[in-house]
Each structure stands twice: as structure tokens, then as C-alpha cells.
Amino acid sequence: MAIASDTTRRLEQLRAILAARRRQLDSDRARLAPDFNALQFLRTDEYGLSAIIRELLDPRGTHGQGASFLELFAKEHLADWKIEPAALGSAEPRLEESTRHIEASRRRIDICLQWQDSIVGIENKLHCAQEQEGQVEAYLEHLGKECSHHRLIYLTRDGSIPSEKSIPASGRVAALAADGPPTLRCIGAADLAKWVDRCAHVCEAERVRAFLHDVSDYIRTELLGEERMEEQRSVVDWSVSNAENFSAAMAVLRSQEAIRNRLFVKLKDHLVTDVARTPLLRAWHVGDCGDSGEPYQVWIRPTSNARYGIRYSLKEGIIGICPQDDRPHDRELEDVARALEARWKGKSSQRWPWFKDFEISGRTGEGLTRVLAKTLDPAGNNLAARVLDEFTRIAMLLDEKGLVLRLQ
């Protein structure tokens, strides 16, 4: 008990230090505007981030830095190609390139960059979009038919490789080949942030440099879940100042998963209470997917045995319609998907008839904790209230269209 109380006392000291640091930041707010970020006024969904990356890679882009940003990108991710810098001046980056060379011509590669006899595709999964059946395999086939000298950059939050759903294991091994020029390279948000930082370092235009700092800050705080550097530095300084503080910090680190689980239970409990108080949803059932091996997912269904429900996956950062089993969704759900798509722009996958981004966590432990912590926000504006609002809006549309029974 004495150890627990000592840990509590030391964490209270840390809380006081951070509170003092935040007061200092508040006093400097008018001069430094520490919370301002240009990206809060721009699209930061998959398309918006792709548009920013495309613009930075364009030698003729409005940034005015020529091919310098592209050269840095090539040096990091195309080093084995031994590209002459002068060749990059003719590169043409394009958004949502049609896979016109293959049968699946309706697919779109987020960014394509072509010069002379070379082409690079970038598939942006920073917002953890669902993988489509044979997606990466199709993209590699298209790029190979466009140019023999080709590569697909697979960009995700954590640098993970595409699943066998997107490309068969044998094809993936060949594409990632270590014994020859790979046609597939997987990078993460941290790699993207480092490239943006390098771009800022070589950038001669102050206004562009400020924007690049905002892009890097957005990637680190919103996609990687990092704390702002000033606060992080205060925590590190306190943690390593003596053995007792270090032990308290380690106790918190060891408790991360237990903290996340407790916050998730709190979220579900709030939803059970709030759904029962919402007239439209009063008959709906609330549950989670822990028993099926899909943690941190919560759903509501019109009946306890309905096959489909409105589900929120915290790890994937999406909310939409999903079945309670692993089978592909029924064709009868197409009307439901069309109605939702007409009201809100979203996506579909083999598993989810329709879904959209919501409270994206980035699949990392830190990102998930950051989202779950919003359960502790003031009532009416916490995570449970926002999830309930989304559930209600979707259920209301289905009710208006007479589509609730399709979820059975």
C-alpha cells in the first residue's frame, strides 16, 4: 500500500509540473500560437493528405523549390534506382490514377509519379482504409504494364505490409524481394514525417517552411499519437530525475493496456445508459466484439440476434454497417449502403457494406489510448456522446428509408 501511495504522490508531482508548463504556454499563446495548425482548415482525409503529398513531390509545384523535395523522397525510398537528379525535373505526379492497363480499370492509385522510363505509385493508407480484394496485386500489375521500372510505395500508419487479401503471400514475397530491386516498399507515418522535416530543412521559402512544420506536427500528433515536444520533454525530464520517479513512470507504462480496457468498459457503459434514454434507439441492443477476438469495437443492433449492426471500430477509426460474423455481406445490404453513401461520403469493403472515418486512432497503442481518453471529457462532449450521435444519425436515416429490417 505504501508503494502505491508513493507512486500516486509522485504522479501528482508530475501533474503539477505539467499544469505549470501548460500555464506557461497559455501565457505565451498570443505570441507563439502553439495550438495553431494550418491543416485544421484543410482536408486531412485520405484524399486531402494525398493532395498535399502530391503537391510537395511536384517539381513544378507552388512551393517553388523545384525537385528538391522529390530528390529527398527518391534518396530515401528509391535509392537503389540511382536516379540522376536532373531526370526528376520532368516528373509528373498525378492524383487517383486509373488502373487503365488492367481489367480492374475502375481502381485508383492515390498518387502516381512518372518520369522517363520510371513510374512510382503511392497507396495512402494513413487513415487505415480497409484493404480491397487483390488491391496491391492489381496496382503492381498496372504499374508494371506502364513501365518496367516501377515501384509501389505502400504508406500506412505503422509501416505494415499489405495482407494476403490485398496480394497473395507468394506475390508479396517477390515484390518485397531483398535479392533484387523490390517493386513494393512499405513505409509508415514516421517515415513520412521525417521526409517532411527534411523538406523543411532545405526549403528556402519561409511561408512554405512554416506549412511543412504544420504538416509534420499533424502527422506526429494526429497520426502517430505523439505528445507535443514541450510536454514530452517535461515528462522525460521528470521520469529520469531520480529512481523513484522512474519507477512511477514505469508503473504507468505497465498499466497502459489495463487503462485502455477500463476506458473501453466506461465507454460501453455510457452507451448502454444513453441508448436506453434515446427514444429512437430504446429498443436497440448494445454490445462489443471482445468475445469474437475483435477488441475495441462497440455496436448497436435493432434486435439481439440481428446479423448486422451499426459498429464503431476504435482501432480502425471507422463507423458503419458491419455483420456480426466473418462472412461477406449480403447483396440485400446494397440498398442500405447506397442510402448511407448518398447522405455521407464513405467507403465499402468485403466485410463492411458501408463505413466512414470516425475518431481515427492509427491502430497504435498510443493513438488508441488518446481516443479512449476522450471518454473522460465533459458530459455531452465526450467520446460516448459523439458515438451515440453518429449511431443515432445512421439509425435515423435507416428508419426514414424503411431499411432497419434489412439489418436482420
Image: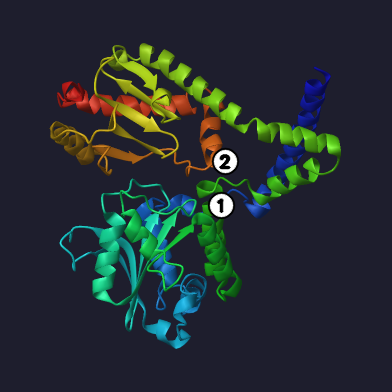
What residue sits 22% from the left and 40% below the top? 341
Which is nearer the N-term, disc 2 or disc 1? 1
Question: Residue 14 location, x and y as percent?
Answer: 77, 35
Query: What amino acid is found at the position of numbered circle 2 in the picture?
Result: Glu
Q: Quadrant of the C terminus?
A: top left
- Secondary element under disc 1, as helix, strand or loop, is helix
What residue sits 72% from the left and 40% below the top? 23
Q: Quadrant of residue 366?
A: top right
What residue sits 39% from the left and 67% below the top? 54
Of discs 2 and 1, which sits in the foreground? Answer: 2
Which sits in the foreground, 90 or 322?
Answer: 322
Question: Residue 129 location, x and y as percent?
Answer: 36, 47
Please say if 213 is above or below 393: below
Tag shown at residue 366: 2
Question: Residue 285 location, x and y as percent?
Answer: 33, 15
Q: How packed is label 1: few (under 14 Cα within 10 Å), some, or many (20 or more)?
A: many
Q: Which residue is mark 1?
A: 220
